[in-house]
Image: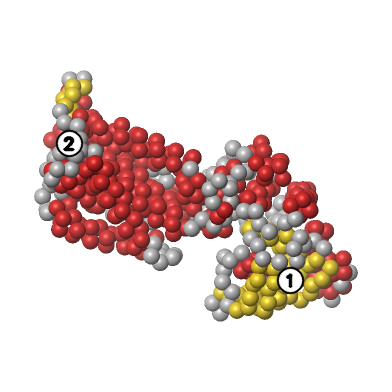
Amino acid sequence: MLHIADLVVRYGAATAVDGVSLDITEGEMVALVGPNGAGKSSLVNAISGMIHPASGSIELAGRTAQVPEGRQMFPDLSVDDNLRLGAWSLGRGKRDTAAIYDVLPELVPLRKQRAGSLSGGQQQMVAIGRALMAKPDLLLIDELSLGLAPLISEKLVEHLRRINTERGTTVLLIEQEVDLAFDLCARAYVIEAGRIVASGDTAILREDPALTAAYFGGFEKRGTAQ
Amino acid sequence: MTLFITFVISGLGVGAAYALVGSGFVIVHRVTHVVNFAQGTYAVLAGMLASRLITTGTPHGVGELLAVLVAGAAGLGVGAVVLARRDTPPFVALLITLGLVFVGLAINILLFGQNPAPSVPLLSGSVDILGATTEWQRLLVVPIALVVFGILGLFFERTDVGRAMTATASNRRAAQLVGINYRRMGLAAFAIGGLLGGIAGVLIAPSQQISPYADIPLAISGFTAAVFGNLSSPWLTLLGGLFLGVVGQLLQGYGVGSFQTQVSLILMLVILIVRARALNAQEEAK
């Protein structure tokens, strides 16, 4: 459902994404991992149309919605209003939030609360709910676990798994926690300095010694492992 | 005592108009971060246009309504100029609005001449309040302003467009992500600012002798009221406007002369100095 070929994203003279090709089929959950500044967010923002690529092509069948980095709440609005606005582009009469509370029941007691007053995990849940309001075929998640306690991240992962199986939503997950990303997703792309350096089944990638050294051992151990 | 009451009541009337002008500043600033000094120009345009329409035979009510709508259209026009380019820095936008104030002044003089418009009150006659004789027209401003503020509150809290404007104000990037068109929201804010200025102008023109040159003084008083509301709270702006109106009328009434603009400027300076730290913190948070 998503086919990207030779995508290049530039900011002035700096090249953030340097000839990336990537494919996702419908119903898949795919992880995009890599260090800070590798071009992950640029890639996702190009897919969602927030930035225009310098060259290359993005073919997308269906709608996307993004769970942005930093969660990006509307802090002055209630949880319910945050969710409603997620369906802004669908038009009036298609902004009923009830279905979201079925998927994310933790939000029910918070619906009247100001989004700015929520904890990070709660905000991330609102961000996911808000993205789902747009009834996306492809859900783009930019940093799911960043700044969250492991238990809360696991809860979110469970929710995503269920959203994927029950609603059939395709997921592209950007994630720093490679363990978490590989647990959730069957397939992954590894991006470094704007290029895809490895891709394939996460079960196989997990056994790749170079990747293991780079990601599972943590960046600080990289030098000693090599 | 009677005199005092007279001054307070007329001050509340003028102050409510400042609050309406000020709330235009607030709404435009919240959504676009632009300080729009044309707010006073809308009031002059609507006030003088209503007078012209009514003296030439348009019935009361219709004339005022048309004038307010024209002010709304003027607001939209100013918005279209200010928001013509994405990412115009707010201080550049402010200069653009100042430029448009002078264009607006020229247009107002061209249309209506330099003299104050003839007074055609919506409500004529006067009433005794605690011994003070007050024109109905002056009394009309406060309840209408309250109703307008109430409607604004409902608009921003209960309608999706209002929520989308608040959303744009609090997180423009997230608003873009969910597909809210920033420019359209900004234009809506400018149009609402025009309507609010227009309502103020129509209401005070009959008792305040509005001429084209009232634009900047009205804008300054409205802006001071808005600063009182931190450029973000309509209700504090209302309070600030009323306070400003009363202080101005008391000073004028007790023979110090008409120093409304100076009073506004001094009050604005005081607020800005006292609140400098809070305002800075707010800017940094953005």
Q: Chain of mark 1?
A: A
Q: Chain of mark 2?
A: B
Q: Position of residue B273 (x, y in %)?
A: 36, 48
Image quadrant holding the C terminus of chain A, namely bottom right
Residue A93 appears in view? yes
Left or right of residue B274: residue B59: left
**Along the viewing direction, whichever of B122 and B281 lies nearer the viewer:** B122
User: Which residue in the protein does label 2 denote?
Assistant: B121
Q: Amino acid at mark 2?
A: Pro
Q: Amino acid at mark 1?
A: Asp
Left or right of residue A117: residue B108: left
Q: Name the residue: 10% across, 50% down.
A: B115
Residue B213 appears in view? no
Circle 2: element type: loop
Residue that lies at the very extreme toward the top in this rendered image: B130
Image quadrant holding the N terminus of chain A, namely bottom right
Left or right of residue B232: residue B54: left
**Along the viewing direction, whichever of B39 and A165 lies nearer the viewer:** A165
Q: Is residue B57 above or below residue A13?
A: above
Q: Which mark identifies residue A219?
A: none
Q: Name the residue: 30% across, 34% down.
A: B144
Q: How is the image coloured?
A: secondary structure
Q: Which mark identifies residue A23?
A: 1
Cβ atoms at labels 1 and 2 below 8 Å apart: no
Q: Name the residue: 38% across, 47% down.
A: B26
